Each structure stands twice: as structure tokens, then as C-alpha cells.
Image: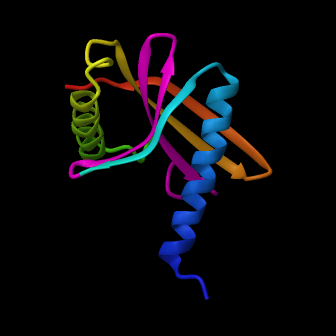
């Protein structure tokens, strides 16, 4: 029997697969996936031209709890910002590159996903 946590992890991985494919079709190039730090996890790290794009993926089957974009709280943004700083500290060749934080919310079914991609969804402050 599959636990609720394992199911959520599988659903999250499937959402990340969908988001990654969607973003790659739009011209972004994947650098790393699921990079974990003490501060938090970076779902997708991509390049769009010379810009490093940190992508938070949110999957919602229904809209009963708000959309995926709304679920990126101030605390989550702070964790993402700190994790991104840790990543850049490990990557000197990217340390001076332009960076941005995108959020891609996926709704609908895995066979008919709908994407809400917010470029530059928040600033690192």
C-alpha cells in the first residue's frame, strides 16, 4: 500500500517532469533538478539564454485550496532565495549571471495539464 507521503512525492515528481518538458519546449535548458540545501530545495534550475532561472513547481489537481502560485508564501520565497544563494556560491561560473525566480503552476490531469508560468514571480530581497 502506498503512503500519502509517497503518493505526494510521486505526484510532485510527475509535475516536475511535466514542467521541465514544458519549459524545455519553450527554449530553457535544464542545469539541475531537485537540488537540496539546509535552507530548502530548488525544483528546477534552468538557463534561458545567459539567465539562471530557479523554478518552483506547484501542482494542484483542483483549485479548492487556491492555485499553485498562491501557495508560494513569503517563508517559501525566503527559503528559495537562500537555497539559490547556496547554489550560486558553489557555481562560480554562474555567480555573476542574471538570475530570476519563476513559478510554474500545473493544474488538470497529467494527460491534459494546464500551465500557469509566472516569469520573475518574485524578487530576491
Residue drawn at x 64%, y 57% as measured from the top left: 61
The single residue placed furthest to the right in the displayed view is: 111
Measured as percent of width and height from the top left, residue 63 is found at 59, 53
Measured as percent of width and height from the top left, residue 115 is found at 65, 36
Q: Quadrant of residue 81?
A: top left
- Seen from the viewer's position, the closer of residues 81 and 92 is 92
Q: Is residue 69 left or right of residue 106?
A: left
Instruction: Look at the image and give the residue range highlighted in magenta.
Output: 38-66
Image quadrant where one finds the C terminus: top left
Measured as percent of width and height from the top left, residue 124 is found at 25, 26
Residue drawn at x 43%, y 43% as measured from the top left: 70
Q: Is residue 111 left or right of residue 63?
A: right
Q: Is residue 7 above or below residue 122?
A: below
Was residue 57 drawn as part of the magenta stretch in this picture? yes
Q: Is residue 33 left or right of residue 84?
A: right
Label the magenta part by its dominant secondary structure: strand
Residue drawn at x 24%, y 46% as measured from the top left: 75
- Seen from the viewer's position, the closer of residues 73 and 91 is 91
Measured as percent of width and height from the top left, residue 72 is found at 38, 43
Amino acid at each position: 500500500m502506498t503512503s500519502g507521503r509517497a503518493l505526494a512525492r510521486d505526484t510532485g515528481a510527475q509535475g516536475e517532469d511535466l514542467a521541465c518538458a514544458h519549459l524545455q519546449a519553450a527554449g530553457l535548458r535544464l542545469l539541475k533538478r531537485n537540488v537540496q540545501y539546509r535552507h530548502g530545495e530548488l525544483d528546477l534550475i534552468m538557463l534561458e539564454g545567459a539567465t539562471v532561472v530557479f523554478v518552483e513547481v506547484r501542482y494542484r489537481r483542483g483549485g479548492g485550496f487556491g492555485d499553485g502560485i498562491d501557495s508560494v508564501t513569503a517563508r517559501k520565497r525566503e527559503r528559495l532565495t537562500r537555497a539559490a544563494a547556496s547554489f550560486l556560491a558553489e557555481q562560480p561560473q554562474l555567480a555573476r549571471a542574471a538570475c530570476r525566480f519563476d513559478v510554474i503552476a500545473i493544474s488538470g490531469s497529467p494527460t491534459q495539464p494546464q500551465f500557469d508560468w509566472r516569469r520573475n514571480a518574485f524578487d530576491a530581497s
